[in-house]
Amino acid sequence: MVETCLRSRSKEIATATREDFYDYSAQLIKVGKNTADNYISILRYAYFKKLNELIIAGMEVLDGSEVIENFSNRLVSEFNQELRDYIFEGIKLPALGISPDEKPKYTRKLIARLEGKIGVDECMKFLNRGLRDRYEESRKPDREKFLKSKNIDEFLKQKHKDFVVELERHFKNNTLFFTQEISEEVLEHVKSDPYIESGVREGNKIIIKKIPHMAKEYLAEKDERKKRYYYCHCPWVKEAFEESDKPISPVFCSCSAGFYRAYWEIVFDQPVQVDVLASLLNGDPICKFAVHIPDNVTTG
């Protein structure tokens, strides 16, 4: 399928670039074959052949692909159809497989309209409930690990150790951690900072920093705007950092708080509050969050 398309352009899959992938993806969209199953098939082939460029591009398509549709559905369920139609007026749901360059255009328009209609505070509350799927099954093992820990501090320390072990495995095997290469510098960066992804308890809160999305490139970069680009995880924002330091309203980073909120609500098996402490869209150099620990959770 993908090989046939590339050969028709005198190219081979082993040397296919990100641009080649999205040219092919555009063809899938054009003929209505841009299904999740087709992209998953490409990913499986890419993993089998160890084609990192193709793996990264395939992951880019699937990662966060549910966000805009979930946004649309939640506007109806939490507000009404009229508000949804106003926010999406003239905007169709994005096709699966569109170029990453196109994605921020949706976010910029939709968030600006929502913020203008319901206000900053309500917009933040809406987004804080998250636009990603909750991935309940994949997170249940962490719930079990938490229950076996004597307290939250022990759980967080073990979580950091496990994360480092996972990155060490990718480094040793020369495989990708999601879409990024793990170098010695990346390993040391994560080892030396337990706030990254795992988090550290400060009083009744867990403070968490995101790992840079492209950590190897981030650590080597000097230009601040480019560093923000390498740091950002959000596929609906990332490419916009190539053009501006603050390309989209900072309220959208409440969606990232919602991502952590979903995880910790599964671990704690109860509602939690998550605050944005720092975000790229607000002009900060990193993204940092505070998870409020429920009163009935043992600390220290």
Image (cartoon, rainbow, N blue to C red):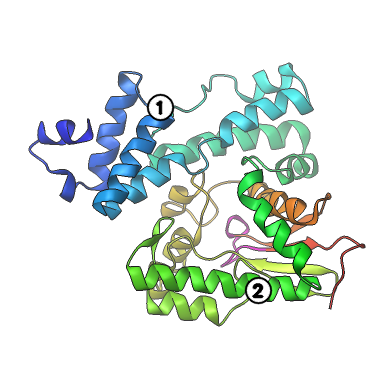
Q: Is residue 72 magenta?
A: no
- Number of marks: 2
Query: Which is closer to the viewer, label 2 or label 1?
Result: 2
Instruction: Look at the picture and state if 239 lies above or below 173.
Output: above
Q: CA distance from mark 2 to mark 1?
A: 38 Å
Q: Where in the figure is residue 117, as x and y percent of width and height?
A: 74, 30
Residue at the left extreme, as displayed: 10
> Do the numbered discs 2 and 1 sit on residues whose CB atoms are within 8 Å?
no
Q: Where in the figure is residue 296, as x and y percent of width and height?
A: 92, 62
Would residue 49 be visible to someone looking at this image?
Answer: yes
* Residue sitting at x 35%, y 19%: 32
* Residue sitting at x 58%, y 64%: 210
Would residue 276 be visible to someone looking at this image?
Answer: no
Q: For the residue marked with disc 1, what is the amino acid?
A: Thr
Left or right: where 24 falls relative to 300: left
* Residue sitting at x 45%, y 66%: 227
Q: Which residues are magenta?
A: 280-288
Give the quadrant of the C terminus: bottom right
Q: For the residue marked with disc 2, what is the amino acid?
A: Gln
Q: Nearer the viewer, residue 143 or 126?
A: 143
Which element carries disc 2, helix, strand or loop?
helix
* Residue sitting at x 52%, y 25%: 93
Circle 1 residue: 35
Q: Nearer the viewer, residue 248 or 80?
A: 80
The circle drawn on residue 155 is none
Left or right: where 174 falls relative to 256: left
Circle 2 residue: 158
Q: Where in the figure is residue 40, as x and y percent of width and height?
A: 38, 37
Instruction: Look at the picture and state if 17 lies above or below 185.
Output: above
